[in-house]
Image: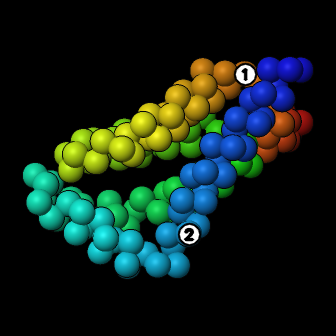
Amino acid sequence: MQNKTSYLIVRIAIGISMFGHGLVRLPKLHAFSEGILKSFENSMLPEFLTLPFSYVLPISEFIFGLFIVLGLFTRMSAIVVSALLISLIFGSALIENWGVITAQLLHIAFIVYLIQNIKDNTFALDNIISIKRAES
């Protein structure tokens, strides 16, 4: 029971972090995108790659963060979030923003914990769905 409770706490915490990142960026999506483009204007990444990512990132953080909080498609959502975080780490390295990489790596560590310990994901919508499927 202790592992399941710990898992729930970590899942909700990391999910709220991702969800919150997306939530605050969505109302100012265009301004957020412009800020990202400005940050990357002197990097080797071309704008045709940076621009779509700058719009997809907050939407993905919002959706997959919410899924993680709810325990819905938890494993798949954690894998998507890990891909986003790896992309952010790569981008941060390209613009030499070393200060944010530590926080991104910390997020990755928690996501890895979720994936590695998915068996402890008992307080989740995933389980309600699997019970309903088993009953049908």
Residue 107 x, y percent position in the rendering: 52, 38
- Residue shown at 69% from the left, 43% from the top: 13
Nearest to the observer: residue 136 or residue 38: 38
Where residue 97 sits in the image (x, y, percent)?
28, 48
Q: In this view, does 112 lie above or below 63?
A: above
Looking at the rendered image, the quarter that the N terminus falls into is top right
Q: Residue at x 63, y 29 (%)?
A: 114
Residue 60 appears at what percent x and percent y?
49, 57
Distance from disc 1 to disc 2, alpha carbons, whole Å, reads 32 Å
Query: Image check: 18 left or right of 6?
Result: left
Q: In this view, does 70 lie above or below 41?
A: above
Q: Earlier in the sequence, mark 1 or mark 2?
A: 2
Residue 118, visible in the rendered structure = yes
Q: Which mark is residue 60?
A: none
User: For this view, does 28 lie left or right of residue 52?
Assistant: right
Question: Dot 2: few (<14), some (14–19), or many (≥20) neighbours within 10 Å?
Answer: few
Rendered position, 132 above or below 115: below
Q: In this view, does 14 lie to the left or right of 35?
A: right
Here the colouring is: rainbow
Q: How crowded is mark 1: few (under 14 residues within 10 Å), some or many (20 or more)?
A: few
Residue 16 at what x, y percent from top left?
66, 52
The amino acid on which the numbered mark 2 sits, given as a three-letter code, is Val
Q: Which amino acid does label 1 sit on?
A: Lys
In the picture of the structure, the residue carrying the numbered disc 1 is 119
Would you say residue 126 is visible in this rendering?
no
Q: Do the residues labelled 1 and 2 touch (CB within 8 Å)?
A: no
Q: In this view, does 134 lie to the left or right of 89?
A: right
Numbered-mark total? 2
Quadrant of the image occupied by residue 2: top right
Q: Which residue lies furthest to the front in this view?
A: 99
Q: What element carries label 1?
A: helix
The residue tagged 2 is 24
